[in-house]
């Protein structure tokens, strides 16, 4: 697979499936300053329906959904890997897809 092919696949990717429960306290998103990313701001969007509005309100800010954060928590002891994933996410507009289905994550 060529890098161009990978970039095409990544830009066509959809955000990970979100849990059906509503966002905490009816919030659409949270703007966070990441210590791990040297103070860079990231946006945690709670529901896919607010993605367009979040992008318009905070252009250029990397957007994460709760399942992506859960996946990153699994590798919290690998900060270099998290930084690399963040760079890929920003450059290609990628989404971090959970490695296990939601039902398996809830059980373990």
Image: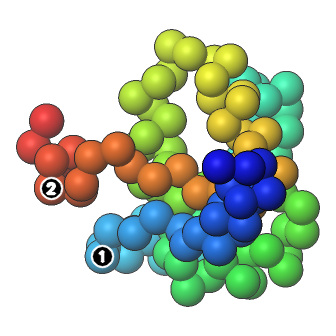
**Which of the image's four quarters has the C terminus?**
top left
The picture places residue 18, in percent across and down from the top left corner, at 40, 69
Label 2 SS: helix
- Residue 4 lies left or right of residue 24; in this view the side is right
Rate crowding at label 1 as few (under 14), some (14 to 19) or many (20 or more) other CA atoms within 10 Å. Answer: few
Q: Tell me the element at label 1.
A: loop
| Mark 2 / mark 1, whichever is N-terminal | 1
Residue visible at 65% across and 73% down in the picture: 12
Front-most of residues 32 and 77 = 77
Q: Which mark is residue 42?
A: none
State the residue at coordinates (15%, 55%): 103
Q: Residue furthest front?
A: 1
Q: Is residue 60 visible?
A: yes
Q: Report crowding for label 2: few under 14, some 14 to 19, many 20 or more residues within 10 A (C-alpha).
A: few
- Identified at 85% across, 39% down, the residue is 40
Residue under label 1: 20
Q: Residue at x 15, y 47 (%)?
A: 104
Judged left or right of residue 76, residue 52 is right
Up the image or down, 34 lies above or below 21; here it is above
Residue 99 image-quadrant placement: top left
Residue 48 image position (x, y, % from top left): 53, 78
Where is residue 19 drawn, in percent x and y? 33, 68
Q: Nearer the viewer, residue 26 or 90?
A: 90
How many angstroms separate mark 2 from mark 1 (CA)?
13 Å
Disc number lying in front (2 or 1): 2
Q: As drawn, is 86 to the left or to the right of 14?
A: right
Residue tagged 2: 103
**Closest to the observer, 102 or 46:** 102
Residue 108 falls left or right of residue 51? left
Q: Report if residue 92 is visible in the image.
A: no
Question: Looking at the picture, how far across and down is residue 58, in whole percent?
Answer: 85, 68
């Amino acid at each position: 697979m060529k890098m161009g092919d990978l970039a095409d696949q990544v830009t066509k990717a959809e955000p990970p499936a979100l849990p059906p429960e509503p966002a905490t306290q009816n919030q659409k998103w949270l703007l966070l300053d990441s210590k791990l990313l040297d103070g860079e701001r990231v946006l945690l969007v709670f529901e896919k329906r607010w993605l367009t509005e979040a992008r318009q309100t905070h252009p250029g800010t990397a957007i994460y959904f709760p399942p992506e954060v859960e996946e990153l928590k699994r590798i919290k002891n690998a900060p270099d890997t998290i930084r690399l994933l963040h760079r890929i996410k920003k450059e290609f507009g990628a989404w971090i897809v959970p490695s296990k289905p939601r039902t398996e994550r809830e059980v373990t």
